[in-house]
Image (cartoon, rainbow, N blue to C red):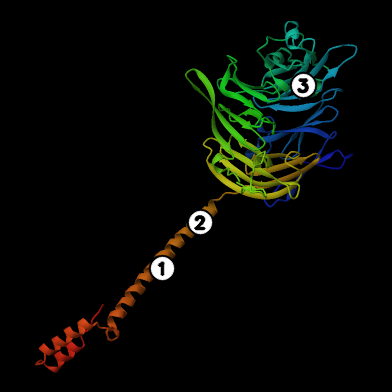
Amino acid sequence: MELNVPGVSCGVMKRICGDGRLLPLYKMDLYSRPKELAIYEIPDPNFKASIPQQEYQPVMFTLCKGGVLMRHNLENGRLYNKIQLSHLPAGSLSVSFLSDVVIIKSPKLKFLPRTESLFRFSVFSMHPFKHLATLDIASSVFPDGEHKSQYGKLRNAEIHDDMLLVMTNKNFTLIYDAQKIIKEKMMGNVDTAEEFVSKCTMGVEKAPPLLFVTLAHMDILGLGACPWTYIRAVSDSVLEVRDLRTEELLEGGQVRWKDKNDVQISPDYLMFHPDDSSRVIHVRTSEIRFLAIRESGGKRRLEEEFIYPEKRKITKNEEPAKYSRSGRLLKTKFELDNSLNRAISFNIDADLRVLVILEAWRDIEHNCTKLLKVVFYDSLSYDLLHEMDICVKVDGDIETNRLSIHLDRDILNIVSNKGSQHTVLVYRLKEVIEEEENEMKRKMLTRLCNSISSDSNMERFHLRRRAFRRSGNTAVERPTHRRQNKRRRARTAGSDESSNESDDDDEWVP
């Protein structure tokens, strides 16, 4: 979506065509400038179009400044709902596909003369679209008195996949059942989403039972795999993968951000594979590792399945030996690592089973970043599917450029973000069926030409052989064969002239 100049509350939705043109679809009136957008591509069964083949349409949620939530039809821009949430500011918008809800979170609020702070969450159901509850997570309730002295005071809160995550000032993360809190605070007397503002501001008076707690440095915590496993940061340089039930560290499950020279060179992080498999992705600036969680002998461990770039393809540039004037061999005190000039970004489409990797290099001569190529792999077998050269230069260094790549069906988006400057490269992926057919035809034509040329060569060989046999007058006789012919002519001296002529015409073929 493209927004017009400030002061005009209007936005234009444009579609990217196959030839790169932008096709305007519709204009959309906005209450105020949008802060966040969320697109729900799963069909919405509540709003049906007149055409039966297009009865389900994707929906776009827009959170605007001033706490206004808007819901549009993504295809034609039709406005479904425009809701004034409250006079309080709205911080972020998130969509939970697992719970089928939209959650709007406020920033940290503090009302005088009260000393406690709180976070307000407005929860909406998407099918059908209606308001469910508004929750005030206050520091006087979370954590409760029993755990507050041990884990610290409330610093931040999030709702993610039916879980309420409470982060404290002592770097602990506490997990509660958010679905239970929402069901307790549901308002049955609110009929429409527009009527909830004056009726449903409700605080949570008592915290539900604590499900799980762990120390997570900088709030780095992830849950996934089967059986349940979690990833946490212990310090600035150590990440761990642990079993959720026993809290034991997996074998090989500790990752450090340091190289052999004990110098931190890249902000490593761990994440679970998005296809819900028992795999972990270890991401560095210059490489990506895919680790599988396996179990043997009652113990779980991490094993490396794939690494990019592959180690066998990495070649070390050997510099020639250098000598001083006196003939002494000069040795460098440090070893140059060329991988520090490489940046990698990736994306995984679990539905298409495709792993897309963008490789970029630092261009020292022009002080920019060179987007080198995009590589496509099978996300399960890691077979190479395709390699596409890009060779596009963008402003900024690999440290200041935030590179991202996204695959949406047949559209490949590459975004380079440097401060407020964005460079977007959009590619449309096409089928290679025609190219394969042309390649097969070319191979068949080549084989046919080779066979024809071989047949013509054999025919020429036989013709030359016949011509050589017929040219007996040009053949050269050896001395031994001359004496044999003279003796034969002497024995047949009494013959007739015709036989003598035939003897004289005998030819020798080497």
Dot 1 alpha-carbon crowd within 10 angstroms: few under 14, some 14 to 19, many 20 or more: few
Q: Give the side of residue 356 with respect to residue 417, left or right.
A: left
Position above or below: 454 against 19: below
Position above or below: 43 against 301: below
Quadrant assignment, res 211: top right
Q: Which residue is mark 1?
A: 453
Tag nearer the camera, 3 or 1: 1
Front in this rendered view, residue 445 or 104: 445
**Which numbered dot is residue 122?**
3
- The residue at the point 71 percent across, 12 percent down is 184
| Residue 190 visible in the picture | no
Q: Position of residue 8 (x, y in %)?
A: 88, 40
3D distance between C-alphas at marks 3 and 1: 79 Å
**Which numbered dot is residue 439?**
2
Q: Quadrant of the C terminus?
A: bottom left
- The residue at the point 12 percent across, 89 percent down is 490
Asked if the residue under mark 2 is in contact with the one under mark 3, i.e. CB atoms within 8 Å, the reply is: no
